[in-house]
Amino acid sequence: MKLRAVKGMHDILPDEIGRWHRLEAAFRAMASRHGYEEVRTPICEPTALFVRSIGEATDVVEKEMYSFQRHDDELTLRPEGTAGAARAYLEHTVHARQAVARWYYLGPMFRGERPARGRQRQFHQAGCEIYGDAGPACDAEMIDMLVGFLRELGVGEVDVLINSLGSGDTRARYRDALVAHLSPRRDELSEESRRRLEKNPLRILDSKSPRDQELCADAPTVLDVLADDDRAHFDALRRYLDALGTPYRVDPRLVRGLDYYTRTLFELRGAGGELGAQNALGGGGRYDGMIAELGGPATPAIGFALGLERLLLAMSPDAPVSAPLAYLVPLGDPGAVACLVLAKELRAHGVAAIVDGRGGKLKAMMSRAEQRQATLTVLVGDGELERGVVTVKTMATHAQEELPRAQAARVLADRLASTERQH
Ligand code: AMP
């Protein structure tokens, strides 16, 4: 039997990793600028945590979780990051020490969905959570931060959709209104939506079937049944977004796949063609009830997650793929010694450097430098050694020059640092 990676789970090879590093570094930098601190929770949690927080009747819990039993414990590979973070927040009684906590996380998630472009069984999310702030100012800041982040990455056009699911019994009242609207047309609904009518009617609004969409077109919306305080929260959110100049569209039919949301809900969709049907780049919302539901004190909370694979598909392709690299080409043995020493000096200046240890013909070494996508190559042969210089070739322009050996490391390090800043 040929051993292969599990279907829907992918290797990320070194030639792709530069873009991952850049994306992760940009996310971390953005999160820190906004006061978020990183949390790392286990990749696997008690199954009950996801059932209770995400909701029993959701697709994720019903059919997508990787669950297994080990040492009498029922465990599940995390399908998302919010539940584990909330568990950690509670377990370490963070609420007792910090009035407001802002956390971010990055890492792999697991859902047994049908694999497609932009949909995998192991995928990566980056997300943020705020505990202890009921908004709506922080809701607006979070959405604005996300929109700014996608711009920074060079993601083209993005649709920002917002909605409110209200709080308290709004969801239940809306559920009843929707069921009352759809029940007389039950037989016309798709099989999946008929099933959802009993278990999770809000998800019918998400149905891809055109007939279901038609039947929902004149259904009441959740915004029609919002209580006064929820409406005021939503109106303020919109006012803040307007003040920040954040583009958005109110979509009163926006519902998301997880059951824990209250009030603010949002989703960012790539409007470009590169994503196809999987155009949701990220989304999130408030989950003011979850911490109490998990046994903690009533704590308002809001969060979002971005799908990193989809961001990589949507990101500008000319984003720099890797850090600058100096490729050192020794011509003969004394040259090899000089290259080893120069490479060590370059690294001490923070520059990535590789010495071509295979030797051989200059042409072969230069083509290996190109393969490694070196920013510049440094050649050292007998002639250079006699004159106390090194020959430097800038790969993008093919320009060639000599630099005094003694200053080469510092000069090249300065030059490469400024190339990096330009990106
Ligand atoms: P969710 O946790 O369902 O709100 O998803 C947040 C984001 O994660 C989505 O907008 C996607 O970008 C990404 N995502 C969710 N499921 C998958 C998957 N199976 N494969 C790749 N990305 C995903």
Image (spheres, rainbow, N blue to C red):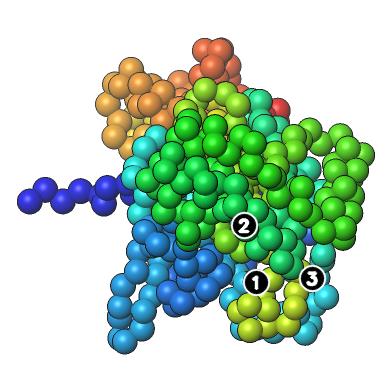
- Is ligand 1 closer than 8 angstroms to the Cβ of mark 2? no
**345 relative to 299, above or below:** above
Residue 117, by quadrant, is top left
**418 relative to 168, above or below:** above
Mark 1 or mark 3: name the one nearer the start of the chain: 3
Assess disc 1: are there few (<14), some (14-19) or many (≥20) residues with their C-alpha within 10 Å of its C-alpha: many
Residue 373 shows in this picture:
yes
CA–CA distance between discs 3 and 2? 28 Å
- What label does residue 169 carry, if any? none
Residue named by callout 1? 290
Q: Is residue 52 left or right of residue 223?
A: left
Query: How far across and how far down the image is residue 260, in percent?
Result: 61, 63
Residue named by callout 2? 175
**41 relative to 184, above or below:** below
Assess disc 2: are there few (<14), some (14-19) or many (≥20) residues with their C-alpha within 10 Å of its C-alpha: some
Mark 3 or mark 2: name the one nearer the start of the chain: 3
CA–CA distance between discs 1 and 3? 12 Å
Q: How many marks?
A: 3
Residue named by callout 3? 132
**Dot 2 lies on which element?**
helix
**Dot 1 lies on which element?**
helix
CA–CA distance between discs 1 and 2? 19 Å
Number of the front mark, 1 or 2: 2
Q: Which of 149 and 68 is in front in this view?
A: 68
Query: How far across and how far down the image is residue 89, in percent?
Result: 65, 76
Contact between marks 1 and 3 (CB within 8 A): the answer is: no
